[in-house]
Structures are given as structure tokens and as C-alpha cells.
Image: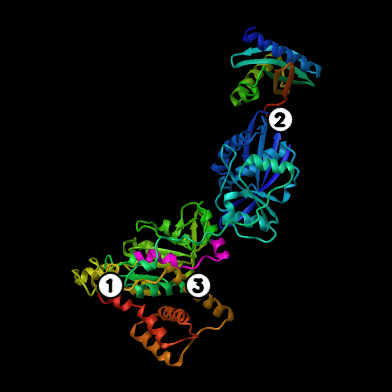
């Protein structure tokens, strides 16, 4: 008695289709799974046995050998429960369906319920590539999938029901994918803030251009509050971006179930491995989990220096190459970095409203924790001060996050249109001397000048202008407050 | 009827069933320090050491599930002892199992010829 079932496993960033062969022979009752199964898969034997019995079928009292082909590939994950049990049942029951073009994924409970799995996007993609067009998967996984042409999804909830359908020879097809979760994002809205519109403007520009932004200011002025609400103005992930992100999350066994941009906020006690990825399994770290989204470093100077220095190269290249024990893995990490810091140990250096109590040596030592190289990677450095007087429910209200997000989305579309037309934005003639002057007075690096120009370009897009004019350049320069931060040095 | 008699009855049923299929019984209830073998048969110059399990209900589960590696390895030790006592040279042998389920005056046989596969 023999059967062959298709399933898939996650291997690195992509899925691989595997075949589960089942052979049942006369012998001592014994269930063995070969072909490099992980501990989770070996444990699935007991779930499979119980689920088959609870669904009203007889578990064969014979020798069951299951082989996972290809044998050299290490298999991980609990989503093989369903194909393993289908393999056993297919060799003892008659299914009125040829299972060659069917792929199965799903975890089982002891009761025979089919539970959601992680990494379904990568697995489904692997099936589609191999021409396996009918995918049987847990119903709750449906909402995280994307439509692929020619592929039909068969959502299931109970093993018993699925077997009945397989015996009858017709599977229920999903009519459409679940609604895309978009409405509830991070908590908060920019309209809850007062008198911080210049920072919100900077953050809006950063959201549209993906600019790394450093917020500097005294304690309690709202740096963290503004940064935490940054997710509320980001455009949703596009379909291809969503696939990338959910594949990265699948590697660590997490499910990425919505279309929001990731927002990662690691605590400053994080290690290098936690930040950039690693361990013996070469898993992605926080920077890769922030791919296509935001990495928020609150109190950036409290992070360990080696951790911050490790960020330099991935920020520039947008990917990270990890190596351990002769194994390699490369993960993308194109994220927007938002960071906050105080300008000195007491926090009031540069403030108009309270005197700083630090001496120049203390300030210098404090700011030296931030290396010049890392500072150079921030496109925008914004100083915000404490409010002059207590203005509860007074002062200018911040703009509504939903409106801001619409603006950001419009600008993103505009930027893409310019990029597609391959027309680089021109600098107006009278703005060129301004750029030269800024380059000299601000003592910019070439990278700094490029950053300044790209910020100015996005500002021009916000102003619905087709060229970079003087005002855009000056605004961009106002967000380039490197020299002001270094005044204390 | 005590447990031993029930066992003996099961062995009797098994013996008849197997003899009908061309097996010759050599020995019943062979004991060694490692354990007991219920029946020993010969067919085509191969010895069959048979464990018999007799059941009248499935109340305590299917008997085949009571066999495990430990039991099989004890059977193997007893089998080697039997062979060394009775034969001069190595002879091919198999460890087998026969399950008898007698329910509603119907008898169901489960025959596993080789437990070591």
C-alpha cells in the first residue's frame, strides 16, 4: 500500500516542494518518518495518529514508513501534519481524486482540527512554481495569501470533512481571498499632538522618501510619541513587498498577517545577532524584519556601540550577508531608520527654555557615542524643543494621520511616475549656487550632498513642482542640522 | 476456564489454522530464561516462532499493539536458544505473530509473518 502526496517546506527565503511517500506493510505496528525531519515533524506522528482516530477513521495497526523527498533537504515546521495524515489515509482509502496536482499544508490538533501555519505565502509560491495548482490549506491562512493566476485554494477546517470531500472527489474552492486588513494600524494619530507641525512635516517627507531621520531634543518633548505614530502615515505594502516581508517573517516562524509596513522597535539592550541576524540557523534579525518598513531606535545612544556600527553597512547596501560555520544567508533589509536622542546627558543643551547643566566635556563625551559615519547616514536630523508654556488643548493641532497618509501615497505615486518615465528631476538654474553654498557652509560629504538633493526632490514632489527650486533646497537644508548638533563638540 | 486455559485454546485455534496452510508444528510452549514462545512451526526449511494473542473483545485495544521491540528481542533470544539446542548449523527463521479475535462467533485472524521487517 503506497501513496505520494505533495507538500512544501520553507528553505531559506523561498519554499521548496517536497513529496511525502507513504508505505504501509505488514509488521509490528510502527510509524517512522525518514528524510531529515526536524523534531517538530517527528512529534507530529502523535498528532497525526490522534487526529485520524478522532476524525472517525482507523489508524492502521501496521508498519508505516513515510519518506520526505528530497532526503538531503532539512525539513522544518508543523505544517506537515496534514500531508502526513493524508498520506496514510490515501494508502488505505480510495480517493476519487488524483492528488498529483494537489498540495497540502496544515497543522493538526489532536481533535482533527486544521490549524493555521506560518510561511504560507512562500509555500504557496513554491507550489505554483512547480505547477501544483490546487492548494489545500487551513481556512484561517486564506487572508494572508495573494491571488496567483491559475491557482485555486481549497480552505479546510476539519480533517474529517476534508477526507469525506476527497472520497467524494470534489473539494470546495475558495471564492475569494479574505478582506485585506488595512484599517486598524498602530495606536494613535498625529492630530493628537500640539505645536509639533514642523516635525510632522519632516516625518511626512521621510515617509514618502524613506529617509533615515534622527529626532533630537530634551526629554519629554514628544520625540518618541511622534516616532511611534510614524506607522500611521506610511502607505500600505504593495503585493510584491508583502510577499517579501511575509517570507522573511516565516523564517522565524512568525506569521505576517496584514498589509501594514513593519514597525520594529527593539529595546536598546539588543545584541548584534538580534539586530542584524545570525545564530547557527542564520535567522534574520530586527533589520530584516523591518524590511520595507521602519526600524525605530529609541534613545539611539543607549544602544551598544558595536550594534550601531554593525548597522552602517546594511543601511547603505539594503541587504545583509550572514556567514556562520561555512553557511551563508543573504537577507534584504531596506528599512527607514527613525531614531531619537538627547543632545546631552541632561537633555537641555540647545534648548531655549531651560539651561543645560552639563559641561562641555560631558557633552562632547556623550555625543562621541554617535560615530560620524552613522550620523552621516541620517538624511534628516530634526531638532525639537520643549514647548515654551503649558498648552494643553491649545496650540496648533497636528494634521490628521489619514490625510497625511493620503498625501504620502500621492507623492509616492508621483515619485514612481518620474522614475518610470526616467526623467531625473532638474535643479532650477538659480538654485545651483544655493546648493554649492550649502555644500561649502555645511561641510557636507558627497553622500551628504546626495542626501540633501534627494530630500529636496521629495519636497518638490510635495509642492507638486517638477523642478527643485531654492525653497525646496533651503527646506531640505533645514533638516540637515548636523552642524547644529555638533556645536557642542 | 482460567487464563492459561484461554491461552491454550487460542494456541489450539492458531495451530489448526496454520497447519491448514502447510506449516508443521514442532513444539508448543517452549520456555527459556528470556521468555516463552507459544508455537514453533516449520515450512520450506524455515522455522517460524509464533506469538499467539487471543482476544474476545476490543475492550483493551487491539492485541498487536501489545507487541513491542522488547518483546520481540526476547523472542529472538529464546529462538536462538531453541536453534542452538536442536540444530547443528544455522537455519533460517522468522519471528511471527498471529492475532485471533473471536467476536459474535466469527473468528478474525491477523497473521504477521515477519516481525523483523
| Front of the two marks 3 and 1 | 3
Image marks 2 and 3: residues in contact by CB distance under 8 Å: no
Identify which residue, B91 or A157, lies in the foreground.
Answer: A157
Give neighbour class at mark 3: few <14, some 14-19, many 20+ (Cα, 10 Å): some
At 28% from the left edge and 72% from the top edge, which residue is drawn? A385
| Front of the two marks 1 and 2 | 1
At 51% from the left edge and 75% from the top edge, which residue is drawn? A410
Q: In this view, does B83 lie to the left or right of A122?
A: right
Please give the range of residues in magenta.
A225-244
**Badge 1 is on which residue?**
A385
> Hey, which quadrant is residue A1 in on the image?
top right
Q: Position of residue A278 (x, y in %)?
A: 46, 56
- Dominant SS of magenta comes to helix
**Badge 3 is on which residue?**
A409
> Residue A243 in magenta?
yes
The N terminus of chain B lies in which quarter of the figure?
top right
Give neighbour class at mark 1: few <14, some 14-19, many 20+ (Cα, 10 Å): many
Residue at mark 3 to residue at mark 1: CA–CA distance: 29 Å
The C terminus of chain B lies in which quarter of the figure?
top right
> Hey, which quadrant is residue A35 in on the image?
top right
Q: Where is residue A405 in the image (x, y as percent from the top left)?
A: 46, 70
Element on which disc 2 rests: loop
Callout count: 3
Note whether A456 is above or below A332 in the view shown: below
Q: Position of residue A269 (x, y in %)?
A: 35, 56
Q: Where is residue A86 in the image (x, y as percent from the top left)?
A: 67, 41
| In the image, farthest residue toward the top | B1
Q: Do labels 1 and 2 share a chain?
A: yes
Amino acid at each position: 500500500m503506497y501513496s505520494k502526496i505533495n507538500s512544501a517546506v520553507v528553505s531559506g527565503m523561498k519554499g521548496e516542494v517536497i513529496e511525502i511517500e507513504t508505505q504501509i506493510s505488514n509488521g509490528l505496528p510502527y510509524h517512522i518518518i525518514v528524510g531529515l525531519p526536524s523534531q517538530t515533524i517527528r512529534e507530529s506522528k502523535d498528532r497525526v495518529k490522534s487526529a485520524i482516530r478522532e476524525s472517525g477513521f482507523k489508524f492502521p495497526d501496521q508498519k508505516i514508513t513515510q519518506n520526505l523527498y528530497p532526503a538531503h533537504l532539512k525539513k522544518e515546521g508543523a505544517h506537515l501534519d496534514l500531508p502526513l495524515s493524508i498520506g496514510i489515509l490515501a494508502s488505505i482509502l480510495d480517493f476519487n481524486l488524483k492528488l498529483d496536482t494537489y498540495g497540502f499544508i496544515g497543522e493538526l490538533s489532536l481533535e482533527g482540527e486544521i490549524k493555521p501555519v506560518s510561511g504560507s505565502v512562500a509555500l504557496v509560491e513554491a507550489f505554483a512554481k512547480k505547477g501544483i495548482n490546487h492548494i489545500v490549506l487551513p481556512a484561517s491562512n486564506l487572508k494572508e495569501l495573494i491571488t496567483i493566476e491559475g491557482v485555486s485554494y481549497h480552505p479546510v477546517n476539519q480533517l474529517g470533512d476534508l477526507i469525506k470531500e476527497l472520497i467524494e472527489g470534489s473539494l470546495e474552492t475558495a471564492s475569494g481571498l479574505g478582506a485585506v486588513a488595512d484599517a486598524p494600524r498602530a495606536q494613535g494619530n498625529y492630530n493628537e499632538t500640539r505645536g509639533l507641525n514642523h516635525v510632522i512635516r519632516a516625518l511626512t517627507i521621510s515617509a514618502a522618501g524613506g529617509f533615515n531621520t534622527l529626532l533630537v531634543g530634551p526629554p519629554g518633548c514628544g520625540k518618541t510619541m511622534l516616532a511611534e505614530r510614524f506607522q500611521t502615515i506610511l502607505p500600505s505594502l504593495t503585493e510584491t513587498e508583502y510577499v517579501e516581508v511575509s517570507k522573511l517573517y516565516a523564517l522565524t516562524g512568525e506569521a505576517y498577517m496584514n498589509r501594514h509596513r513593519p514597525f520594529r522597535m527593539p529595546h536598546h539592550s539588543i545584541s548584534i545577532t538580534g539586530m542584524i541576524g545570525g545564530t547557527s540557523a542564520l535567522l534574520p534579525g530586527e533589520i530584516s524584519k523591518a524590511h520595507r518598513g521602519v526600524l525605530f531606535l529609541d534613545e539611539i545612544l543607549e544602544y551598544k556601540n558595536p550594534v550601531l556600527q554593525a548597522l552602517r553597512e546594511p543601511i547603505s547596501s539594503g541587504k545583509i550577508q550572514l556567514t556562520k560555520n561555512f553557511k551563508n544567508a543573504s537577507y534584504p533589509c531596506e528599512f527607514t531608520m527613525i531614531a531619537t536622542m538627547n543632545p546631552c546627558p541632561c537633555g537641555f543643551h540647545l534648548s531655549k527654555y531651560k539651561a543645560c547643566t552639563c559641561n562641555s566635556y560631558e557633552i562632547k563625551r556623550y555625543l562621541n557615542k554617535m560615530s560620524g559615519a552613522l550620523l552621516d547616514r541620517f538624511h534628516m536630523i530634526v531638532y525639537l524643543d520643549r514647548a515654551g508654556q503649558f498648552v494643553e488643548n491649545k496650540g496648533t493641532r497636528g494634521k490628521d494621520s489619514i490625510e497625511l497618509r493620503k498625501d504620502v501615497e500621492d507623492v509616492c505615486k508621483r515619485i514612481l511616475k518620474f522614475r518610470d518615465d526616467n526623467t531625473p528631476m532638474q535643479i532650477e538654474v538659480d538654485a545651483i549656487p544655493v546648493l554649492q553654498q550649502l555644500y561649502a557652509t555645511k561641510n557636507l560629504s558627497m553622500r551628504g550632498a546626495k542626501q540633501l538633493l534627494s530630500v529636496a526632490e521629495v519636497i518638490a514632489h510635495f509642492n507638486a513642482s517638477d523642478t527643485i527650486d531654492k525653497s525646496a533646497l533651503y527646506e531640505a537644508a533645514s533638516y540637515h542640522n548636523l552642524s547644529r548638533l555638533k556645536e557642542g563638540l | 476456564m482460567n487464563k492459561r486455559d484461554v491461552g491454550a485454546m487460542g494456541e489450539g485455534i492458531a495451530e489448526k489454522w496454520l497447519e491448514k496452510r502447510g506449516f508443521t508444528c514442532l513444539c508448543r510452549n517452549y520456555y527459556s530464561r528470556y521468555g516463552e514462545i507459544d508455537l514453533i512451526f516449520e515450512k520450506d526449511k524455515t522455522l517460524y516462532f509464533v506469538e499467539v494473542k487471543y482476544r474476545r473483545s476490543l475492550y483493551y485495544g487491539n492485541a498487536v499493539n501489545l507487541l513491542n521491540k522488547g518483546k520481540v528481542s526476547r523472542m529472538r533470544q529464546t529462538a536462538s536458544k531453541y536453534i542452538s539446542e536442536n540444530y547443528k548449523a544455522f537455519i533460517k527463521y522468522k519471528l511471527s505473530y498471529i492475532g485471533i479475535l473471536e467476536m459474535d462467533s466469527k473468528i478474525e485472524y491477523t497473521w504477521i509473518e515477519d516481525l523483523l521487517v
